[in-house]
Image: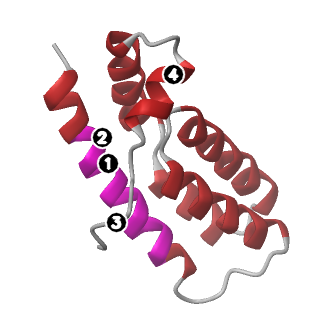
Amino acid sequence: MADDVVYVNIEEGVKRVMNNKKLYVKLLHKFIVDMNIDELFVTVQGGDYEKAQEQAHTIKGAAANLGLTKLSRQIQDFETHIKAKDIKPGIPEAVKVCYDSTIDEIKKVIAQYGS
């Protein structure tokens, strides 16, 4: 993990919720609970690309709205591969690493700014 990688852009995320840090932290917690990347992988492995594309799109949008920039971009790339039904080896693994790193950073933000 590079030191210059920003997984959680707090400033951008807080700005999107009208500078309400308490709400932002609540939404980060909700992201952890609601956005299950493993369900997406199961759907892809099952060959339901339409459903997988919807799941990826939902995660991408939630990530973008919360300032989870790297994850949003990674999921956007994954969504493109899903749409093309062209999941190359290593892509899901890279998404999982990014997701896990993002979740770790979210937990740090929640610990720092949460109640």
Cα separation between marks 4 and 1: 20 Å
- Kindly identify which residue carries mark 2: 106
* Foreground pick, 3 / 52: 3
Mark 4 / mark 3, whichever is N-terminal: 3
Q: Nearer the viewer, residue 13 or 72?
A: 13
Q: Earlier in the sequence, mark 2 or mark 4?
A: 4
Q: Inspect the image, locate mark 1, and give the three-letter code of the amino acid beneath it.
A: Ile
Query: Mark 2 and mark 4: span between their CA atoms?
Result: 16 Å
Category of crowding for the residue at label 3, using alpha-carbon neighbours closer than 10 angstroms: few (below 14), some (14–19), many (at least 20): few
Q: Quick one: 19 or 102, which is closer to the camera?
A: 19
Q: Which residue is mark 1?
A: 103
Which residue is labeled 4 in the image?
15
Q: Give the vertical position of 17 relative to 29 (above or below).
A: above
Q: Which residue is mark 3?
A: 4
Q: Residues within 10 Å of mark 2 (few under 14, many from 20)?
A: many
Q: Element type at marker 4? A: helix
Q: Does the magenta segment cover residue 94?
A: yes
Q: CB of mark 2 within 8 Å of CB of mark 3? A: no
Q: Residue 58's quadrant in the figure?
A: top right
Q: Which residues are magenta?
A: 93-107
Mark 1–mark 2 CB contact (< 8 Å): yes
How far apart, in angstroms, are the residues tagged by discs 1 and 3?
17 Å
At label 4, which amino acid type do we have? Lys
